[in-house]
Image (spheres, rainbow, N blue to C red):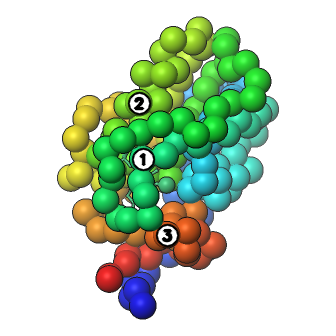
């Protein structure tokens, strides 16, 4: 059985979400935003964050697989679910749960470059700077965290623990 230790409490997350929402509102004035949520992990974050934003927000979902049921990236990235409607000419904010090596987002951004977007920014709840293997410009970061495997608030270990209302560090 895995051991869990609270790393970021629900209160800390809520406070940070308020700050991020104000930042995004400032940057986008009253422009319409398309939240491009990366399944499944970012859904909890995307919902809680965008509820705090007064701009009109629409949603699209993509699924990108890079991990098996292990805690290490396979390095192989592919799109397993693409967007349903056209995202051209939209102001896109990619919403991710965590940026680790950066490979998933490098692949996604490369894929989106082929489309004519009004703008694209990247927002992640968690960031593990020590683990980065590729250069990625991140516009909005909830929390920088150390090189530890974490679960909760959408993040899973073998599909478990997504529903924890806080971020926990996992010891195996
Ligand atoms: P990257 O391509 O290495 O940046 O990996 C990003 C993906 O790996 C995230 O969307 C997560 O699904 C997964 N991941 C990376 N670190 C963790 C972690 O600490 N806990 C849970 N999932 C993680
Ligand atoms: Mg994931």
Instruction: Locate the C terminus and report the quarter of the image it occupies.
Output: bottom left
Q: Residue at x 55, y 75 (%)?
A: 161
- Sooner in the amino-acid sequence: mark 3 or mark 2: 2
**Residue identifier under label 2:** 107
Of residues 16 and 81, the one drawn nearer to the viewer in this rendering: 81
When the figure is inspected, residue 151 is found, relative to residue 74, above or below; the finding is below
Residue 89 seen in render? yes
Of residues 75 and 115, the one drawn nearer to the viewer in this rendering: 75
Whole-angstrom CA distance, mark 2 to mark 1, is: 10 Å
**Residue identifier under label 1:** 66
Mark 3–mark 1 CB contact (< 8 Å): no
- Whole-percent x, y for residue 68 in the image: 43, 58
Whole-angstrom CA distance, mark 3 to mark 2, is: 23 Å
Mark 2–mark 1 CB contact (< 8 Å): yes
Q: Residue at x 52, y 42 (%)?
A: 64
- Whole-percent x, y for residue 90 in the image: 67, 18
Residue at disc 1, secondary structure: strand
- Sooner in the amino-acid sequence: mark 3 or mark 1: 1
Q: Label 2: how many residues lie within 10 Å, few (<14), some (14-19) or many (20+)?
A: some
**Residue identifier under label 3:** 158
When the figure is inspected, residue 164 is found, relative to residue 156, above or below; the finding is below
Label 3 residue near ligand 1, CB within 8 Å: no
Q: Label 1: how many residues lie within 10 Å, few (<14), some (14-19) or many (20+)?
A: some
- Sooner in the amino-acid sequence: mark 2 or mark 1: 1
């Amino acid at each position: 059985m895995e051991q869990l230790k609270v790393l970021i409490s629900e209160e800390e997350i809520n406070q940070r979400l308020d700050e991020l929402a104000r930042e995004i509102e400032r940057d986008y004035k009253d422009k319409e935003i398309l939240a491009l949520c990366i399944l499944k992990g970012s859904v909890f974050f995307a919902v809680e964050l965008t509820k705090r934003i007064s701009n009109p927000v629409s949603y699209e979902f993509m699924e990108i697989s890079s991990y098996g049921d292990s805690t290490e990236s396979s390095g192989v990235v592919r799109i397993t679910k693409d967007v349903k409607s056209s995202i051209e000419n939209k102001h896109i904010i990619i919403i991710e749960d965590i940026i680790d090596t950066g490979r998933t987002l490098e692949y996604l951004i490369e894929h989106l470059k082929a489309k004519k977007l009004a703008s694209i920014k990247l927002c992640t709840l968690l960031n593990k700077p020590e683990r980065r293997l590729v250069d990625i410009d991140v516009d909005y970061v909830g929390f920088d965290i150390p090189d530890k495997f974490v679960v909760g608030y959408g993040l899973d270990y073998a599909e478990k623990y997504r529903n924890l209302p806080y971020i926990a560090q996992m010891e195996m």
